Image (cartoon, coloured by chain):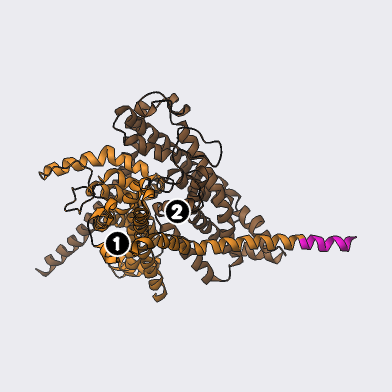
Amino acid sequence: MKSLLVPSFKIRRNLRDKSSSFWMKCCYYLVLSMPFILLTGLLIKSSLLFGEKTFSELIFSSEWKPLSGKFGFLPFILSSLWITFISIAIAAPVCLLTAIYLTQYAKRFVLKVMHPVIDILAGIPSVIYGVWGIIIIVPFVSKVASWFNIHSSGYSILAGSVVLSVMVIPFVLNILIEVYRSIPIELSEASLSLGATKWETIKKVLTRKAFPGIISSFGLGISRAFGETIAVLMVVGNVVQIPKGIFQAGYPLPALIANNYGEMLSIPMYDSALMLAALILFIVVTFFNLGSRYLIMHYEKKV
Amino acid sequence: MKRKFKINRQVLRKSEEIFYRVLMILSTSIIIIALLAIIISILVKGIPSLSWSMISQTPKGGYYFGKEGGILNAIIGSLYLSFGATMLALVFSLPLALYMNIHKMKQKNVVNVIRFFLDLLWGIPSIVYGAFGFTIMVYFGLRTSLLAGIITVTLFIIPIMVRSMDEVLKTVPKGLLESAFSLGSTRSETAFRVMLRQCIPGMITAILLAFGRAIGDAAAVLFTAGYTDYIPNSLSQPTATLPLSVFFQLSSPIPEVQSRAYASAVVLTAIVLIISIASRGFSSRYQKNRIK
């Protein structure tokens, strides 16, 4: 009897192990195939448009008249680029300085305050950022524009960039803190013992060492900023035009998809064009993502 | 003369440091001020029009012209959606996170490849997931529904959940795993009975983080979950969500509706803050049960 019980117990254990391992493997393959599934889906959907037009025709034309079959993505791409780069230009110095402060100078209680602050900033939904943008940033931008004698409603590229910069700050800052923390303490000890001041050590030793990490954190910030939808959509104005200044309204790619989704189903070409917009987003974001990560890995190997 | 020059250099070195320290403190305070500005401005605009009837009623006729009603449909809809998506994502995320840290413990390359893919997926904007989910939905002939919304949001939060679980599991000392194996437990027993129990607080934090992401995201559900004035009572019905209700009400030209959008924003912010505080509480409270 006993000898019968033992194998059945063993079999049950084995079965449990096998079945859970099988399910784990399924999840593993699912995640590995996910980017390719996404890419193929978007490619198939946007291939309809490629049948009629060349790629450069779509990218470099600025005429957007979907009802007469003209799809020029230039205004959207330029708006996206403007907003992304201005927002990173605002966020980058703030993040860098804060990261240095938090890792090198800050007292314990500052860290205790800043950790929840960063976490909460990262957790606030994008629509709330959009509401905040409408309440505070848009009127403010309108006022700033009037100082320069420019008439602007405030719904502009600049407003979108400011809102977006606050959104990417927690993301970039977290990576930068990680980068600065991972530098071995011996480096700064050696520098300090040679008579350098604390700031000189940070500037000439730590930041030089962290440089690839810093660049890649900005790259990841760009990839995050490029795809942000709702918050930007709410404050950027959404006018199809090639932006000529930061106080003008823009129309970034994600907003294009979000605004037109309901109505496009009736026209297959329109549907295809919006999928192409999603594809461009996917590719640009992935490019920056891969580039930044490659930089980190390449550098880590060398050191 | 030479001495004087030297002193000047010293002063310069010191003053440069002071200058940058001031800048650093300035930029740190900018971040704090930004957070305060967001929360205070939402509260100031939203609290006056927030009332009990607003969060306990569904929209009545003419709600979107400033008549009676509330946003209960959106609150419940959002909770259904995020809860469903979090549960569904958990079914995929937890096994994968354990798989990476136990089954593939020795194969660093495999683990790094998965991490790389997860980071890649994490970086893809939610609007792309939304567009993709919509395509899939149309392909299978589904209408906008709670189910379609849940599936899209699940795809979107899986990388977030796995990555944060992975971060927790990574910190478990190797010795614990090795002793579990040496006592003769199988890999799945080690995974679920030892590692999982050891990491419960971190896991809950990861789940809550994913839940917070799910409830706050608007772009992924914009096309897939639809919008309705009723509380959904089956998976095939469309559902309202809080972010979209904020968004739609704010784009109305009527001031009463706009002020309700601010009130809805307060509700959404409150939910997200509660989740954030709860996850902090969890991670510190159960920390003491861990084997160090």
The chain coloured brown carries which letter?
B
Determine the residue positioned at 66% across, 55% down: B193
Q: Name the residue under label 1.
A: A198
The image position of residue B178, as x and y in percent, is 64, 66
Residue under the image location 56 percent in, 39 percent down: B234
- Which of the image's four quarters has the N terminus of chain B? bottom left
Q: Which of A43 and B266 is in front in this view?
A: A43
User: Was residue B2 drawn as part of the magenta stretch in this picture?
Assistant: no
Q: In this view, does A116 lie to the left or right of B7?
A: right
Q: Do the residues labelled 1 and 2 touch (CB within 8 Å)?
A: no
Left or right for A140, reference B287: left
- Dividing the picture into quadrants, the one containing residue A103 is bottom left
The amino acid sitting under disc 1 is Lys
**Which label was assigned to residue B135?**
2
Magenta span includes A6: yes
Q: Which amino acid does label 2 sit on?
A: Thr
Q: Distance between the residues labelled 1 and 2?
A: 56 Å
Residue depicted at x 63% and y 53%: B197
Please tell me the numbered disc located at residue B250: none
Chain ID for orange: A
Q: Mark 2 lies on which chain?
A: B
Q: Under tag 1, what secondary structure?
A: helix
Q: What stretch is highlighted in magenta?
A: A1-11
Which residue is nearer to you in this view: B276 or A101? Answer: B276
Q: Position of residue A237 (x, y in %)?
A: 25, 45
Q: Main SS type for the magenta part?
A: helix
Labels 1, 2: one chain: no
